[in-house]
Image: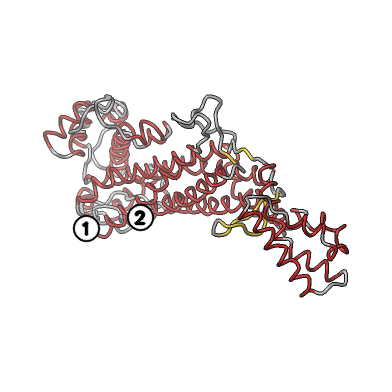
């Protein structure tokens, strides 16, 4: 407020998180208007509670404060902060200027952290309330995708090398499971938030005890009343000047974990796009490259990975801040928290909006998936072929040796000549395998190599995913909109 350029000007730096990526609703929660309006609301709640408990505050003063909650003179506040070098007192004076009758009781008995920290907790709660349904919608869209493709065989990869088959839906459930853990953790952190409340300069409530002439019960009632007005079920019993900064660690740790989940999912999508098996949405007029017009770059997934990396690093800020808070409080937390808390939520908001957009338009190419399976399945089927030959009266060892020789010949065609895997064709023309030639189509059916994948998808969705999403049913139809 007291310094900086014209943030609406193209000649001044603006955070891309706010100007380019994050949703308007999340940007508003971290806006100056929302913050300072909440400060005024907190001063009103404090005055109302103090009046109820017997302090000489008039109805006229209360009404004057109510009438001016939105009447914020930001220019005056900036000038006051520049003069006073104190943001809270700048806004006490600015509020008092438009509430001359109430000016003398604004901030009565409070310390700066009464408005600063309590507002931060309100903002954290409301920001989490914005993220929860967005994450639920991503899970819902991916659940629809997984259900529809629960039985579609695809080549599995370990070490990004061909492994046994899985299904497209089962792989998607790996993504969903991580996001479900994130949803549960976000909800837990949100529900565990406690209000700082009315605690005074070092958390002892001494100023309020003096205001109420040593009446412990009234001080406790004041704390309880303001906490309830703010919509919190509980307040901290113990604080220093601030609420413990470990709260910030808890919140940003959960967001960092969400970032890890999204990075893994979008990396998988990027790799699948390279294999031409699955692609993110690509708009009709979208340009993939300024130089190569044929390119279809997975820019949404790349954006998610890029921002997820930033989100994962932000948890280091509250970790270090909490570790260096001397005694009841030091102010070296303030500037850092102004940046990291807002950036964490705006970043999480962006990647969830983008991932929802991706999950609503994923494109699958079954023929490409089928071709890749055909390239690898002959080698995977060798154990099944050996078992069939043994059942037909053959020797396991003789069959194993036959297949070993033919497999190496087929591998040479693939690696040395760049040809297709012709192992099955070699088996079909080898008289040794004539007892099972009629069974080869069945032995090579991809669906027989996916185990219980489709059943696992169905059970997982029904038992774990759908019950978790039930509280968010009313917001499931909202479509994702990308800012840029």
463 left or right of 283?
right
How packed is label 1: few (under 14 Cα within 10 Å), some, or many (20 or more)? some
Q: Which mark is residue 249?
A: 2
Q: Where, by quadrant of the figure, is residue 9 drawn?
A: top left
Residue extending farthest front: 417
Residue occupying image coordinates x 27% and y 55%: 321
Q: Residue 361: in sight, yes or no?
A: yes
* Number of the front mark, 2 or 1: 2
Task: State yes or no: discs 2 and 1 in contact (Cβ < 8 Å).
Answer: no
Q: Relative to 420, does residue 93 appear above or below in the rendering?
A: above
Quadrant location, the N terminus: top left
Mark 2–mark 1 distance (CA, rounded to whole Å): 18 Å
Residue occupying image coordinates x 63% and y 52%: 417
Q: Residue 461: in sight, yes or no?
A: no
Residue behind mark 1: 328
Observer-nearest residue: 247 or 208? Answer: 247
Where is residue 37? Give x, y as percent: 31, 33
Q: Which mark is residue 237?
A: none
Where is residue 88? Give x, y as percent: 21, 39
377 left or right of 310?
right
Q: Secondary structure at mark 1?
A: loop
Q: Relative to 174, does residue 231 appear above or below in the rendering?
A: above
Where is residue 66? Give x, y as percent: 32, 30
Q: Secondary structure at mark 2?
A: helix
């Amino acid at each position: 407020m007291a310094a900086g350029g014209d943030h609406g000007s193209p000649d001044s730096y603006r955070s891309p998180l706010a100007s380019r990526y994050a949703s308007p609703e999340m940007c508003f929660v971290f806006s100056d208007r929302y913050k300072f309006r909440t400060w005024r609301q907190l001063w009103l709640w404090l005055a109302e509670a103090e009046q109820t408990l017997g302090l000489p505050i008039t109805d006229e003063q209360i009404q004057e404060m109510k009438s001016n909650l939105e009447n914020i003179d930001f220019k005056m506040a900036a000038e006051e902060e520049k003069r006073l070098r104190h943001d809270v007192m700048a806004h006490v004076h600015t509020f008092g200027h438009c509430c001359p009758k109430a000016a003398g009781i604004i901030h009565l008995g409070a310390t700066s952290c009464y408005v600063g920290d309590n507002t931060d907790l309100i903002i954290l709660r409301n920001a989490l309330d914005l993220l929860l349904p967005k994450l639920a919608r991503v899970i819902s869209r991916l659940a629809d995708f997984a259900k529809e493709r629960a039985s579609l065989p695809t080549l599995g990869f370990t070490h990004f090398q061909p492994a046994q088959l899985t299904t497209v839906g089962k792989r998607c459930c790996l993504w969903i499971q991580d996001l479900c853990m994130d949803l549960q953790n976000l909800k837990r952190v949100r529900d565990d938030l406690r209000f700082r409340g009315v605690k005074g300069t070092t958390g002892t409530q001494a100023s309020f005890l003096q205001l109420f002439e040593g009446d412990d019960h009234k001080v406790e009632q004041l704390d309880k009343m303001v906490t309830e007005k703010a919509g919190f079920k509980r307040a901290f019993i113990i604080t220093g000047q601030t609420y413990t900064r470990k709260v910030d660690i808890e919140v940003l740790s959960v967001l960092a974990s969400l970032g890890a989940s999204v990075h893994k999912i979008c990396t998988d999508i990027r790799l699948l796009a390279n294999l031409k098996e699955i692609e993110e949405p690509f708009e009709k007029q979208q340009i993939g490259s300024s130089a190569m017009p044929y390119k279809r770059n997975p820019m949404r997934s790349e954006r998610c990975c890029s921002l997820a990396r930033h989100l994962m690093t932000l948890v280091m800020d509250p970790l270090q801040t909490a570790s260096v808070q001397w005694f009841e409080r030091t102010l070296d937390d303030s500037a850092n928290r102004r940046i990291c808390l807002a950036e964490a939520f705006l970043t999480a908001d962006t990647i969830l909006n983008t991932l929802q957009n991706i999950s609503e338009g994923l494109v699958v190419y079954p023929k490409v998936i089928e071709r890749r399976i055909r390239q690898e399945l002959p080698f995977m089927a060798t154990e099944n072929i050996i078992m069939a030959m043994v059942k037909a009266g053959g020797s396991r060892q003789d069959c194993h040796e036959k297949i070993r020789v033919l497999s190496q010949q087929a591998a040479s065609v693939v690696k040395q000549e760049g040809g297709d895997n012709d192992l099955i064709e070699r088996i079909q023309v080898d008289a040794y395998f004539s007892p099972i030639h009629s069974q080869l189509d069945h032995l090579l059916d991809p669906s027989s190599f996916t185990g219980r994948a489709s059943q696992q998808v169905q059970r997982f969705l029904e038992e774990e995913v759908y019950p978790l999403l039930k509280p968010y049913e009313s917001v499931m139809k909202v479509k994702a909109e990308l800012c840029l």
